[in-house]
Amino acid sequence: MAMPEERNPITYCSLSTLRARGWTPFLVRAFLGEPDRERPEELYLTSRVREAERRPDFVAARDLRRRRAHALREANERRREQALTAIRTVPLEVPVLAPAELADRAVRHRNVRDAQRAALSWGHRPRPVSAESAAPAELARWEVEYLRDTLAPHGLLLEALPPGRGRAEGRRLLTERIFGVIAAAYPALELECRRQQAAEVAGRSRPGAV
């Protein structure tokens, strides 16, 4: 008695499977079109996928996109290295001021930021302060904040970095350099620099102006 002929089981490829095989969204649209099943997810008959993968125009299109993706990764890596080198080497200078002048500028800077905050928030009222009325820890915080803002334009260096981990790495390097420059110019502010840097590393927001 002849055995019944076994049928090949019908199988499907999910989008994640296609991606692992080298497909891109463009290739799926161009060579497969609509999915063969849509529940529980978009699925494409494996037989159709294999047939498309044998087409010379598919192979050419896939290889072209691979070359473009590789070139883009290399370009982004060069861009990242160049931007990080600039962040590591750009000269950073803060104004070197007498203690009284630094305190006066820092307090005025703090009061301006406090007034700006009041203009943007219905629930905040400006509270101007003076250097004489400030506690030493408050004054140190405002002085570091003022000196950091004198270096704020260097933040534009981060814009040269491609999005992703390079941007976070660049921000960390620039922040370390800024605090290092401030602490070197004003040793009395080294402890406050370390405190603010630790807050940055912990992901907390930059200390407020008040």
Image (cartoon, rainbow, N blue to C red):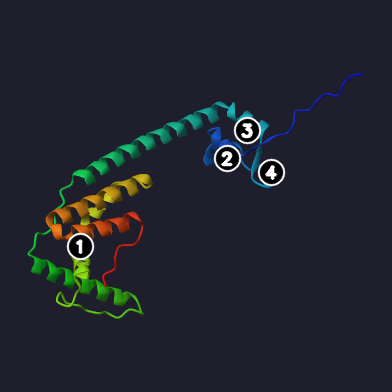
**In the rendered structure, which amino acid carries the disc numbered 4?**
Arg
- Report, in whole angstroms, how far the alpha carbon at label 4 lies from the one at label 2: 15 Å
Label 1 or label 4, whichever lies nearer to me, is 1
**In the rendered structure, which amino acid carries the disc numbered 2?**
Ser
Please state if 183 lies on the left or on the right of 121 as rendered.
left
Mark 1 residue element: helix
Quadrant of the rendering where the N terminus is positioned:
top right
Q: Mark 4 points at which residue?
A: 37
Front residue of 89/14: it is 89
**In the rendered structure, which amino acid carries the disc numbered 3?**
Val
Label 4 or label 2, whichever lies nearer to me, is 2
Which sits earlier in the primary sequence, circle 2 or circle 3?
Answer: 2
Establish if 139 lies above or below 35: below
Tags 2 and 3 in contact by the CB under 8 Å rule? no
**In the rendered structure, which amino acid carries the disc numbered 1?**
Val
The furthest residue to the right: 1
Q: Position of residue 80 (x, y in %)?
A: 31, 41
Tags 1 and 3 in contact by the CB under 8 Å rule? no
Front residue of 86/127: it is 127
User: Which residue is at 83% across, 23% downward?
Assistant: 5
Hey, which quadrant is residue 131 in on the image?
Answer: bottom left
Q: Mark 3 points at which residue?
A: 49
Establish if 188 lies above or below 124: above
Which sits earlier in the primary sequence, circle 1 or circle 3?
Answer: 3
Tags 4 and 3 in contact by the CB under 8 Å rule? no
- Report, in whole angstroms, how far the alpha carbon at label 1 lies from the one at label 4: 61 Å
Q: Name the residue under label 1.
A: 144
Quadrant of the rendering where the C terminus is positioned:
bottom left
Establish if 30 lies above or below 131: above
User: Which residue is at 15% across, 60% downward?
Assistant: 188
Tags 4 and 2 in contact by the CB under 8 Å rule? no
User: Which residue is at 21% across, 50% downward?
Assistant: 177
